[in-house]
Amino acid sequence: MKRIVLPLVCVAALSGCASINGFPEPVIPAHQATAEVEAFTNSASKEKIEDCLAKTDDTERQACRNEIVDARLYAIDAVYFEFERTINSEKNITNVGADAALLTLGGLGTTAVGVATKTALAAASTGIVGIRGSYDKAVLAEKTISAIVSQMNASRAAVRAAIETGKQKGDYSDYTLGAALSDVLAYQQAGTVPSALDEISKAAAEKSTKEQGDLKTLLTR
């Protein structure tokens, strides 16, 4: 029986990692955040936009433009932060603990009935290989998700900077409500996985082209 204790402790240790996701509990509960998103969405409704477009005073148009844009930005951010929290939780090595438990218990089931030493060693070996394969896949997934989230955050920051720059322009005609809303849509798109993968691919292609060009220059000297 003592031989069984150590593997089970190891499995428990691996499985225990799954409870850590790196995020504290949100100060604003999900249901409250959802209600706030709805409220801010109403602040940027079709009627609000029509009212803003009907204004003729530049100061008033800038004020209502900023109010509508800020409302939509808040709504987008609230949804994105919950999405980021969820996607980051996928980085946890949950499957490692689960797979390790299954493989270890399977091996223990084989050895518990008094089979030959050779069979026991084979079962242990199979378990180790399986755990290692599961770990490798989990680590790969973790790094992939980290790269995607980093790209999404970088893209969002770039678009947000453009929006804030536009809002600070002196004349409304230099940054109209239509232009601002177009940037808001780009801001929302920047926080998506397909957009992040596209940006990562573009960056890799540009880097490859540059490196190949540099190499060609060196070889032709």
Image (cartoon, grey):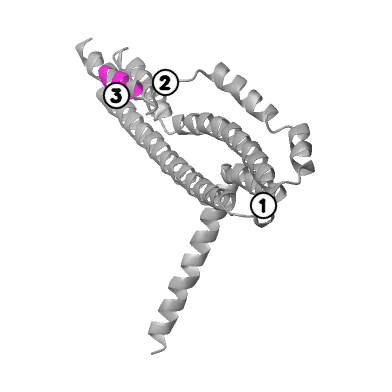
Q: Position of residue 24 (x, y in %)?
A: 39, 23
Nearer-the-camera pick, 109 or 5: 5
- Magenta residues: mostly which secondary structure? helix
Residue at the farthest bottom position: 221
Give the label, 3 or 2, closer to the camera. 2
Residue at the farthest left position: 2
Q: CA distance from mark 1 to mark 3?
A: 77 Å
- Which of the two labelled residues, at mark 1 and mark 3, occupies the earlier sequence position? 3
Query: Which element type, helix, strand or loop, lies under badge 1?
Result: helix
Q: Residues within 10 Å of mark 2 (few under 14, many from 20)?
A: few
Vertical side of 25 occupied by 199: above or below: below
Q: Residue at x 69, y 44 (%)?
A: 61
- Which of the two labelled residues, at mark 2 and mark 1, occupies the earlier sequence position? 2
Give the label, 1 or 3, closer to the camera. 1
In the rendered structure, find residue 25 and report the number of the disc placed on it: 2
Q: Residues within 10 Å of mark 1 (few under 14, many from 20)?
A: some
Residue with the mark numbered 3: 120
Residue with the mark numbered 1: 172
Q: Amino acid at mark 3?
A: Ala
Q: Amino acid at mark 2?
A: Glu
Query: Which element type, helix, strand or loop, lies under badge 3?
Result: helix
Vertical side of 202 occupied by 187: above or below: above
Horizontal arrangement in the rendering, residue 56 relative to residue 208 (left or right): right
Q: Which residues are magenta?
A: 9-15
Q: Residue at x 22, y 18 (%)?
A: 6
Q: Quadrant of the C terminus?
A: bottom left
Q: Amino acid at mark 1?
A: Tyr
